[in-house]
């Protein structure tokens, strides 16, 4: 079996993909379509249908290869990004292909690769950074050693304000809680900084001392979260922002995707729309602004409470109801909608939700997804009563293999 591979594409996880001499697909991280690479001796791991290997030498570099600007990407083999070695146009092409391939292969849909909306900023866009913690340090996992952690200096896709906070925090490690397991740095929509420390030990008693040790202009709010417990503020302002709730890590691009999704519904004033997996209410705000009546459902009680208090919702005058519950548990109790927006977590729709949508189809459904594979699976299940009318991808996650996709469905009534 030859140790030289011609790379022909980018797979869903961001690895380059080629073929071994026996025709088996082989996935090779940090490679570029159009190049030939020699695999590192002993790195090839062969499975029944595919194989994985690592690069020993690039024999013929691809035309779209670039030097990654982040030192962690090469030196520490950081697993947070997968595509920094590709120029941005090639990243967009790869993501279009990833979505299109999933829709055709898993979804069994005869669709071309979708249009993709480029990111406003391909760097310094993340408003949230989650760090794994070990004794005396915190950082990310190497892509080839997921159990290890390297000490983070600077993340080039994170907002500079978060990295300024991290610079201050990592120099005062003694003021973090003992038995620290995870750190989450977050920038809220008003520019407020949040530091959530998860630990297996006693409550974080030195949080205020850490706040005082940081530059005054940071004004960070510190949260302590026990492992598998609920976070609470231990130092700083009594903000109403739920820092542990889900929110898009790329705010501007997340808003662009939501606005396009809402525009595709074509709802009239007064029509009822279900906003399922509605989070902190961003989609509900847009729907209410168009005069729609909205029922928004999410399992996160803090996110729902925040959504209820949003002044934009109250100012719209639209009838808006927020429910804190699992979507699959309450669908049978909701009045019949004229349209639905779905924005489920990465795992996709619960089977009971798919059954409800196919058993009682509605005129229009818009599905927002961050995972092409589970999106394609769900679309295949929904195909019994729905047809795909439009697909558009949005690059919310530059330098990574992740991509946001919005699909417009019409129900067969």
Image (cartoon, rainbow, N blue to C red):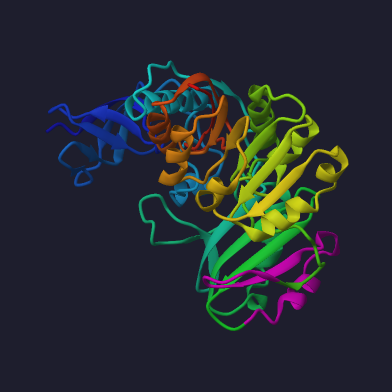
Decide: is 258 above or below 248. Answer: above
- Residue 212 lies within the magenta run: yes
Question: Which residues make up the magenta segment?
Answer: 203-232
Q: Farthest residue to the right: give it.
A: 315
Q: Position of residue 225 (x, y in %)?
A: 61, 71
Q: Nearer the viewer, residue 362 or 98?
A: 362
Where, by quadrant of the figure, is residue 285 drawn? top right
Q: Is residue 397 left or right of residue 19?
A: right
Residue at horizontal 72 percent and vertical 61 percent from the top = 194
Look at the image and tell me whether residue 178 can be seen: yes
Q: Position of residue 250 (x, y in %)?
A: 65, 41
Residue at horizontal 59 percent and vertical 46 percent from the top = 277
Decide: is 45 above or below 38. Answer: below
Q: Is residue 376 left or right of residue 179?
A: left
Q: Position of residue 306 (x, y in %)?
A: 74, 55
Q: Position of residue 144 (x, y in %)?
A: 35, 51
Look at the image and tell me whether residue 153 can be seen: no
Q: Nearer the viewer, residue 186 or 169?
A: 186
Residue at horizontal 60 percent and vertical 53 percent from the top = 129
- Residue 250 lies within the magenta run: no
Q: Is residue 215 left or right of residue 402?
A: right
Q: Nearer the viewer, residue 305 or 295?
A: 295
Decide: is 283 above or below 222. Answer: above
Q: Quadrant of the N terminus?
A: top left
Q: Nearer the viewer, residue 363 or 218?
A: 363
Residue at horizontal 53 percent and vertical 59 percent from the top = 139
């Amino acid at each position: 079996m030859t140790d030289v591979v011609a790379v022909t594409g980018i797979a869903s996880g961001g690895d380059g993909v080629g073929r071994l001499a026996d025709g088996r697909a082989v996935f090779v991280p940090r490679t570029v379509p159009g190049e030939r690479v020699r695999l590192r001796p002993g790195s090839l791991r062969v499975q029944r249908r595919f194989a994985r290997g690592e690069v020993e030498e690039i024999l013929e570099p691809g035309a779209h290869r670039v030097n990654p600007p982040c030192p962690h990407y090469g030196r520490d083999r950081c697993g947070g990004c997968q595509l920094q070695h590709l120029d941005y146009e090639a990243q967009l092409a790869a993501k279009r292909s990833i979505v299109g391939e999933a829709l055709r292969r898993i979804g069994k849909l005869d669709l071309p690769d979708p249009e993709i909306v480029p990111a406003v900023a391909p760097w310094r866009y993340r408003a949230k950074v989650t760090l794994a913690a070990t004794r005396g340090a915190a950082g990310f996992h190497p892509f080839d050693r997921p159990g290890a952690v390297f000490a983070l200096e600077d993340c080039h896709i994170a907002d500079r304000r978060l990295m300024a906070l991290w610079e201050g925090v990592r120099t005062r490690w003694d003021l973090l809680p003992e038995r620290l397991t995870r750190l989450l740095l977050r920038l809220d929509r008003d520019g407020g900084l949040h530091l959530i420390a998860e630990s297996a030990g006693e409550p974080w008693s030195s949080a205020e001392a850490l706040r005082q040790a940081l530059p005054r202009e940071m004004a960070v709010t510190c949260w302590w979260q026990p492992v598998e417990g609920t976070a609470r503020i231990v130092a700083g302002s009594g903000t109403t922002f739920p820092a542990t709730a889900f929110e898009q890590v790329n705010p501007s691009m997340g808003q662009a995707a939501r606005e396009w999704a809402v525009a595709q519904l074509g709802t009239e004033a007064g029509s009822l729309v279900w906003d399922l997996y509605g989070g902190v209410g961003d989609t509900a705000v847009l729907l209410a602004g168009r005069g729609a009546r909205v029922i928004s459902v999410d399992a996160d009680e803090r996110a729902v409470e925040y959504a209820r208090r949003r002044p934009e919702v109250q100012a719209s005058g639209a009838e808006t109801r927020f429910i804190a519950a699992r979507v699959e548990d309450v669908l049978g109790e909701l009045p019949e909608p004229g349209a639905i927006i779905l924005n489920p977590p990465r795992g996709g729709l619960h089977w009971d939700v798919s059954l409800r949508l196919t058993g009682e189809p509605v005129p229009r459904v818009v599905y927002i997804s961050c995972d092409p594979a589970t999106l394609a699976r769900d679309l295949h299940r929904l195909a019994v009563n729905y047809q795909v009318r439009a697909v558009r991808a949005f690059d919310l996650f530059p330098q990574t293999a992740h991509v946001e996709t919005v699909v417009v469905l019409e129900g067969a009534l």
